[in-house]
Image: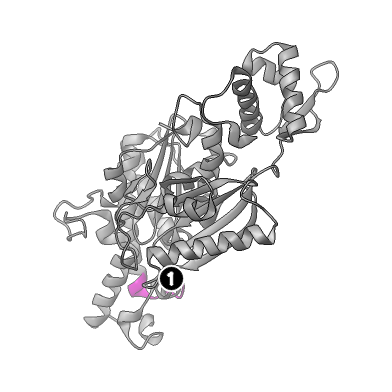
Amino acid sequence: MLKKFTGNLSQKEKSLKELYKLIFENGSVSKGDLIKLTGMRQTTCTRLIDELLVSGLIKECGYGESSGGRKPLMYEINKNINYVIGIDISRTYTKILLMDLSFSIIAQAKFKMNETTTPDVTIDLIISHINKMMKLYQLTKDDILGIGIGTIGPLNREKGIIINPNNFPSDGWENIKICERLNDVLQLHTILEYGANTALLAEYSQEPFNQFRNVIHVIKGTGTRTGIIMDGRLVLGTDKLSSLGQGHMIVDLYGRKCSCGSNGCINAYSSISAMKNDIIDAIQQGAPSLITNKVSNIEDIDFNDICQAVNDGDPLSTRIVQNAAYYTGVGLANLAQVLFPDLIILSGPTYTNMELFYDVVTSTASKRCEKMYSNQRIIFSRGQLGENATAIGAGRIVLEHFLADSASNGTLNKLYI
């Protein structure tokens, strides 16, 4: 029945959708609260609740607190009436999650992205994993609401096209009609969105993050991707801006050349590739490092080698990581001094795998903000969902699509601008 909550709806169907949406958003709610929230008559609300119960979309979930009379009966959505699939396509891996409507993970799969994972290979692997999950849990396409994809820009979200992402490890990622191709094979409605937005949407649904009105979420690894919530609403920005991201904010006007053509961008100092190149250059110029004991060819070092060297107290790696984190903190402070966030969520491998990087970034950003605005207090967090955030949020936009107002084509419902 959820799939019928789109298109031209009768007044009754709109009312059923409104009630379901409120029950979903509140977690559990009483009939009295629903009447207050909707302004419906008691008889009308009772009739519609009964219809939602009979259809299996909602269920009774016990009794709430009494306000003087009998304890009210509470209602919640039936999380197992349908399922959603969330996909995260990044430069380093692709993750597929099968989730119920509470976005609890039922099954998951993950594979590395490398020079062999062309669009054809990647799409075939996604289809194969989805089919295996559906077969394992005996699900048909009617059980699945749809597929949400969170990935790197630039994108044409309306047409479901990945346009031309930077620094993908394989060739061929130009103008890929990924939604059309998945829908053609799996016959499942597919939605494409920026991964930074889906990750923030997922994190923002968690307690206590959903209590904040202004939130910045930064995913940092090979590049820097940023999602922003202002006054409780997700700001999508433009496709052109999203293709570059906050990592191309200039922090040194006459600094080193960046891949985008400008000088002094954050990414030129603090991306994983920038840190790796700085370490290689220093070692080749004779600087001592513990890393030389771990690899026969210094050109072969990877991010894990850098993390291990920092954890082992290697002076060279520590100095370079601290420098990279300092520039990142400066850029984050610049962003914060414009947007005045209450909360900044920092995720991605540079934050989650290196305590030093996270500590220097947050310390630098805090100190610079405090100098400018002594009454501004920013809370920093690594988030709660880890590397699953992007895929969970991608699954969430599928349900949001079916619950969005008919007059709006947005996929992110009340958070969508």
195 w.r.t. 343: above or below: below
Identify which residue, 201 or 357, lies in the foreground: 201
Residue 5 x %, y %: 58, 31
Residue 126 x %, y %: 50, 61
Residue 251 x %, y %: 23, 51
Residue sticking out furthest to the left: 254
62 w.r.t. 244: above or below: above
Judged left or right of residue 70, residue 158 is left
Identify which residue, 234 or 270, lies in the foreground: 234
Is 251 covered by the magenta stretch? no
Residue on which disc 1 sits: 307
- Amino acid type, callout 1: Cys
Residue 238 x %, y %: 30, 39
Query: How many numbered tags mark residues here?
Result: 1
Residue at x-position 39% and y-position 73%: 116
In the picture, the quarter occupied by the N terminus is top right
131 w.r.t. 102: above or below: below
Identify which residue, 156 or 270, lies in the foreground: 156
Residue at x-position 53% and y-position 36%: 400
Q: Magenta residues?
A: 311-317
Say whether residue 373 is visible.
Answer: no
Residue 287 lies in quadrant: bottom left
173 w.r.t. 47: above or below: below
Residue at x-position 29% and y-position 55%: 164
